[in-house]
Image (cartoon, grey):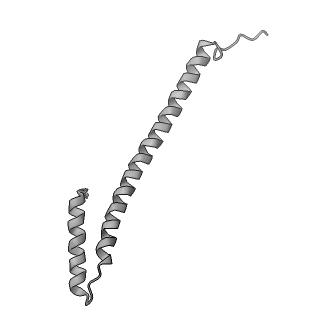
């Protein structure tokens, strides 16, 4: 299922839900609108943090792989990886 990532859509959606709840309730509450806005901003923050953590994990894995390759090339250049002939 495709997700709608447009923040304007979510603001309109939250407003529609709020107006629906307000019409059903006997006393209108102003805090619900503030909570909805905070929820939307929190979801956006969480998404950005998830993307940042994903890139950070990818970068660390790539750095580790590059480090292993550099060590193997260095050891090979200094003949540490060659089999030494054993005298019998």
Q: Residue furthest front?
A: 30
Quarter of image, res 83: top right
Q: In this view, does 87 lie above or below 55?
A: above
Q: Which residue is drawn at 25% across and 56% down?
A: 5
Question: Left or right of 1: which side holds 35?
Answer: right
Q: Nearer the viewer, residue 87 or 12?
A: 12
Quadrant for residue 2, please give it: bottom left
Would residue 43 appear left or right of 3 to someone viewing this image?
A: right
| Residue 76 x %, y % | 59, 16
Image quadrant for the N terminus? bottom left
61 to 67, vertically: above or below:
below
| Residue at image location 56% in from the left, 18% down from the top | 73
Q: Is residue 2 above or below residue 19?
A: above
Q: Image check: 6 left or right of 65?
A: left
Residue 58: name its quadrant.
top left
Where residue 39 appears, as percent x and y from the top left, is: 34, 66
Identify which residue, 34 or 86, lies in the foreground. Answer: 34
Give the total of numbered labels. 0
Q: From the image, which quarter does the C terminus lie in?
A: top right
Residue extending farthest right: 88
Task: Give the residue at x 23% y 86%.
Answer: 24
Name the residue rendered at 64%, 12% in the picture. 79
Point out residue 33 in the picture as x, y percentages from the top left corner: 28, 73
Front-most of residues 81 and 77: 77
Q: Residue 60, position in %: x, y?
A: 50, 38
């Amino acid at each position: 299922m495709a997700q709608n990532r447009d923040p304007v859509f979510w603001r309109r959606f939250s407003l529609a839900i709020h107006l629906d709840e307000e019409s059903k309730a006997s006393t209108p509450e102003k805090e619900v609108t503030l909570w909805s806005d905070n929820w939307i901003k929190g979801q956006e923050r969480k998404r950005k943090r998830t993307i940042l953590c994903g890139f950070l994990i990818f970068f660390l894995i790539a750095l580790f792989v590059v480090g292993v390759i550099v060590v193997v090339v260095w050891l090979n250049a200094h003949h540490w990886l060659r089999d030494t002939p054993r005298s019998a």
